[in-house]
Amino acid sequence: MVSNSDCPFLDKVPIDIRTQIYKELLVSNIIGTADSVSRGANYGADTKYGLFPHVLRVCRQIYVEASDVLYKENTFYIACLRVDNHFYMNMDMDGGSDDDDSTAVLCVEGPLVELSPITRYLNNQSRMPFPIPNLGNCSTVLRVGKWRVVISRRVFSGANSEPTWNWSLRDFCEAISQNPLLSLEVLLLPCGLDYGGTSICSFDSCEQILKPLRILRNVQTCAIKEACATDVPDIIQFNEDEWVEKFREINGALAEIPRGLKMEIETLTTGQQPLDVRHMMHKNLVAYARTFERHRPYKMQMGLRQEDITQLDSRCLEHAEFLDTGSFNPFIEPTLHPLEFELRNCQDAVMNSGEDEWIFKEHRKHALTYLEPQWNQIMVANHRLTTFIKQHKVPGGIFDAAERKKEKLGFSNNPWEIRDPDWEQKICLALVYLKRYAKAFKRHTTSAIEAQILSQRDLYNSHYKNLPRDRLIKHLMTDHQVGKIRHFITKFSTAVDMCDRQYLEMLTARKALFDHDGLGEYECGDFNLHKELSAEMIDWCVNEPDLTPQDSSDADDDYGEVSDDGSDWSNYY
């Protein structure tokens, strides 16, 4: 709780009275109804909920206290349907003309994400945004304590001229799975109530449509009920009453929610039974795999299915630049890189939630097994370089913290050229360790992938050699070739820090790999997460204790790496 020192008035009002005031200002029943996302009110953006949110801006303490009331006392409505809208190009925006292609924007009619007061402003957009809205990216969803969820079992084929409605609890359940709820009310539309815009329709079983609820735990109260017409958002049309009754007569068994299934899911969601949260397991795996790639467009595409990659278009500036270069990605086409192959298999296993959970774990094992040799190479190179730096980050050493400070202030006494043979040897060794460390981050490939790279080698190499880290290391190598060492410590330390950031990203992601394996059953045996390793950067501003370092110039025997035979150090790829 924030101190009251900045708002003495709060000291005079007891917390229970303040809470009651917040309830009067911030609690409304309409938030839990379909009226909160009316189509005529721009899916809630223009709806007056009768709330007074300005109170949240008074001071920090009121914001904390009142926010808790807003998100925990209100019951929030959500209709778990996604609309596959028909996009269109608007060629005349902001005064542009039809002849000016640069003014063309992608527009959309209808909601973009699940209908809820939480998402009302996302669904009020006419321009198609990027990235495409996703319920999991809406941070306020995680703050809600009470939900009233509407879902339909109908599978819409959709007419060509009409949007397609896709009902699914998957995105909603994945978004809230890490947030214990106070209450969850799931309202299932009676089969035949909602009109699909076409005479062709089918229905999922209750087991199938409610399956995503099985990943939820620690919900205080859960109830699965049949919805009524007033629970349906007005964007959905109703069938005639006669048709609904006729359907119930023909499909009586299909129309009812099985009592046993209802009790099973309600018991499961309110319990504390451990489980493997596969979508989070996959998310952590992809996060770890992406740390091995430095070119942003390649990194963005890792772990995505081909249909997901097609959603990355010119609206994303980084991906637009990638598209302008010809969309060349040798890791995914025409032959998939082994890591990409396993990541896609993992994604498919997550999407097909009915499959054996060990299918996902088996493919995760293959992905981690493939990455392990490179991880070990990077870890050893990091240890070797860090040890060398600490040995020489002492008074009078080549990485003396005092000398680095002088370099930054422009008062360095280091000559422009290398004159001391001992320093020459140490600088050479430092550059060798740095070069090996940087090279260790280059992704491992197969012969097939190398052949795909070879077809456009110059383009591929350009993605990496122009990155800041690579340019700086090349500059260091060039300085050494001409015998210059002015500002050596500053340049070298910056290059090391750049490498270390990627290494520490890997280490952090690696430590989190199994955070959501709730069952504690790991497929990787004695896979070492290296949680004991420090995730701290080198402190270049403080010298190490001078312990008289040993000469390590001939210590390659225990390094496990073949010495480089190239003399051109500026080309370290």
Image (cartoon, rainbow, N blue to C red):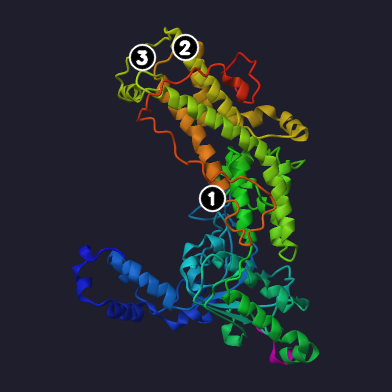
Q: Is residue 441 visible?
A: no
Asked whether 555 or 27 is in front, the reply is: 555
Instruction: Look at the image and tell me in which quarter the N terminus lies.
Output: bottom left
Secondary structure of residue under mark 3: loop
Q: Which residue position holds label 2?
A: 424
Q: Residue 202 falls in which quadrant of the image?
A: bottom right
Asked whether 19 or 369 is in front, the reply is: 369
Q: Answer yes or no: do the residues labelled 1 and 3 have beta carbons within 8 Å?
A: no
Which region of the structure is painted magenta? Answer: 238-243
Q: Is residue 191 left or right of residue 510?
A: right
Query: Percent x, y for residue 497?
Result: 46, 32
Give amino acid for label 2: Glu
How far, Cα to Cα, is label 1 from label 2? Answer: 59 Å
Q: Which residue position holds label 3?
A: 414
The disc, 3 or 2, on the residue closer to the chain's N-terminal end is 3
Label 3 neighbourhood size at 10 Å, few (<14), some (14-19), many (20+)? some
Q: Is residue 545 left or right of residue 136?
A: left
Eye-nearest disc, 1 or 2 = 2
Asked whether 172 or 311 is in front, the reply is: 172
Q: Which residue position holds label 1?
A: 103
The disc, 1 or 3, on the residue closer to the chain's N-terminal end is 1
